[in-house]
Image (cartoon, helix red, strand yellow):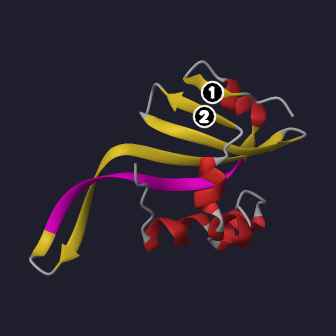
Amino acid sequence: AAVSLRDTELLHMARDAKRRRGAALSAEDLLNLPAHLANARATLWDTEDPALIYVLNVATNKAQKVVVRVNWTMRTNGAQGRQTMLANAVRTAGKVQVGDLKADRYKLIEGDLEK
Protein backbone atom coordinates (compact mmCIF):
# COMPACT_ATOMS: atom_id res chain seq x y z
CA ALA A 1 0.00 0.00 0.00
CA ALA A 2 1.13 3.51 -0.72
CA VAL A 3 2.04 5.87 2.11
CA SER A 4 1.84 9.61 1.48
CA LEU A 5 3.55 12.54 3.13
CA ARG A 6 2.43 16.12 2.54
CA ASP A 7 4.87 19.00 2.70
CA THR A 8 2.92 20.41 5.67
CA GLU A 9 3.71 17.35 7.80
CA LEU A 10 7.31 17.24 6.57
CA LEU A 11 7.83 20.85 7.71
CA HIS A 12 6.19 19.98 11.04
CA MET A 13 8.60 17.06 11.55
CA ALA A 14 11.66 19.15 10.70
CA ARG A 15 10.75 22.35 12.56
CA ASP A 16 13.37 24.20 14.60
CA ALA A 17 11.59 23.78 17.95
CA LYS A 18 11.58 20.01 17.55
CA ARG A 19 15.26 20.00 16.54
CA ARG A 20 16.28 22.19 19.49
CA ARG A 21 14.74 19.82 22.02
CA GLY A 22 16.37 16.82 20.31
CA ALA A 23 13.07 15.28 19.18
CA ALA A 24 13.46 15.65 15.38
CA LEU A 25 14.65 12.99 12.99
CA SER A 26 17.69 13.93 10.94
CA ALA A 27 17.30 15.24 7.38
CA GLU A 28 18.92 12.00 6.18
CA ASP A 29 16.35 9.90 8.07
CA LEU A 30 13.50 11.94 6.57
CA LEU A 31 14.91 11.57 3.05
CA ASN A 32 15.21 7.81 3.56
CA LEU A 33 11.77 7.40 5.15
CA PRO A 34 10.47 4.87 2.57
CA ALA A 35 13.39 2.51 3.25
CA HIS A 36 13.09 3.02 7.00
CA LEU A 37 9.37 2.18 6.97
CA ALA A 38 10.03 -0.95 4.91
CA ASN A 39 12.67 -2.09 7.43
CA ALA A 40 11.20 -0.84 10.70
CA ARG A 41 12.49 -2.41 13.88
CA ALA A 42 8.92 -2.72 15.24
CA THR A 43 5.37 -1.89 14.25
CA LEU A 44 2.76 -0.99 16.86
CA TRP A 45 -0.96 -0.20 16.73
CA ASP A 46 -2.19 2.77 18.78
CA THR A 47 -5.52 1.59 20.21
CA GLU A 48 -6.50 5.01 21.61
CA ASP A 49 -5.75 7.19 18.58
CA PRO A 50 -5.82 4.68 15.71
CA ALA A 51 -2.56 4.71 13.82
CA LEU A 52 0.38 2.52 12.93
CA ILE A 53 3.54 3.44 14.83
CA TYR A 54 6.72 2.45 13.03
CA VAL A 55 9.75 2.27 15.32
CA LEU A 56 12.82 2.86 13.18
CA ASN A 57 15.63 2.68 15.69
CA VAL A 58 16.12 2.08 19.40
CA ALA A 59 19.20 3.44 21.18
CA THR A 60 19.60 3.47 24.97
CA ASN A 61 16.28 4.99 26.14
CA LYS A 62 15.27 6.82 22.92
CA ALA A 63 13.44 5.53 19.85
CA GLN A 64 12.69 7.03 16.46
CA LYS A 65 9.03 6.70 15.54
CA VAL A 66 6.82 7.51 12.57
CA VAL A 67 3.04 7.78 12.92
CA VAL A 68 1.00 6.64 9.91
CA ARG A 69 -2.77 7.10 9.86
CA VAL A 70 -4.53 4.40 7.85
CA ASN A 71 -7.37 5.57 5.59
CA TRP A 72 -6.80 9.17 6.66
CA THR A 73 -9.15 11.68 5.02
CA MET A 74 -7.05 14.24 3.17
CA ARG A 75 -8.28 17.35 1.42
CA THR A 76 -6.35 18.46 -1.62
CA ASN A 77 -6.61 21.05 -4.35
CA GLY A 78 -6.69 19.38 -7.74
CA ALA A 79 -7.57 20.25 -11.32
CA GLN A 80 -11.25 19.77 -10.45
CA GLY A 81 -10.98 21.98 -7.36
CA ARG A 82 -11.04 20.92 -3.72
CA GLN A 83 -11.12 17.13 -3.36
CA THR A 84 -11.29 14.64 -0.54
CA MET A 85 -9.35 11.39 -0.67
CA LEU A 86 -8.38 8.57 1.64
CA ALA A 87 -4.69 7.86 2.11
CA ASN A 88 -2.26 6.10 4.39
CA ALA A 89 -0.57 9.26 5.58
CA VAL A 90 2.55 9.98 7.61
CA ARG A 91 1.30 12.47 10.18
CA THR A 92 4.37 13.01 12.35
CA ALA A 93 7.74 11.57 13.28
CA GLY A 94 10.32 12.12 15.97
CA LYS A 95 12.29 10.75 18.87
CA VAL A 96 10.51 9.54 22.00
CA GLN A 97 11.31 7.66 25.19
CA VAL A 98 11.25 3.89 24.60
CA GLY A 99 9.18 3.49 27.77
CA ASP A 100 6.43 5.62 26.24
CA LEU A 101 6.04 3.06 23.46
CA LYS A 102 5.53 0.28 26.01
CA ALA A 103 2.32 1.86 27.34
CA ASP A 104 -0.87 -0.24 27.31
CA ARG A 105 -2.34 1.85 24.49
CA TYR A 106 0.21 0.36 22.05
CA LYS A 107 -0.10 -3.22 20.81
CA LEU A 108 2.97 -4.80 19.24
CA ILE A 109 2.25 -6.10 15.73
CA GLU A 110 5.76 -7.21 14.84
CA GLY A 111 9.38 -6.71 15.85
CA ASP A 112 10.61 -5.64 19.27
CA LEU A 113 11.55 -2.55 21.26
CA GLU A 114 14.69 -3.92 22.90
CA LYS A 115 18.02 -2.45 21.83
In the image as oriented, which residue stretches furthest toward the bottom? Answer: 79
- What label sits on residue 110 in the rendered view? 1
Badge 1 marks a residue whose secondary structure is: strand
Q: Residue at x 54, y 66 (%)?
A: 12
Identify the magenta region: 83-95
Mark 2 Cα within 10 Å, few/some/many (few <14, many 20+)?
many
Q: Is residue 42 left or right of residue 82?
A: right
Badge 2 marks a residue whose secondary structure is: strand
Mark 1 Cα within 10 Å, few/some/many (few <14, many 20+)?
few
Please identify the quadrant where the C terminus is shown: top right
Q: Is residue 11 left or right of residue 22?
A: left
User: Are the two marked residues, 1 and 2, in contact with CB atoms closer than 8 angstroms?
Assistant: yes
Q: Which residue is mark 2?
A: 43
Between disc 1 and disc 2, whose residue precedes? 2
Q: Is residue 59 above or below residue 19?
A: above
Q: Amino acid at mark 1?
A: Glu
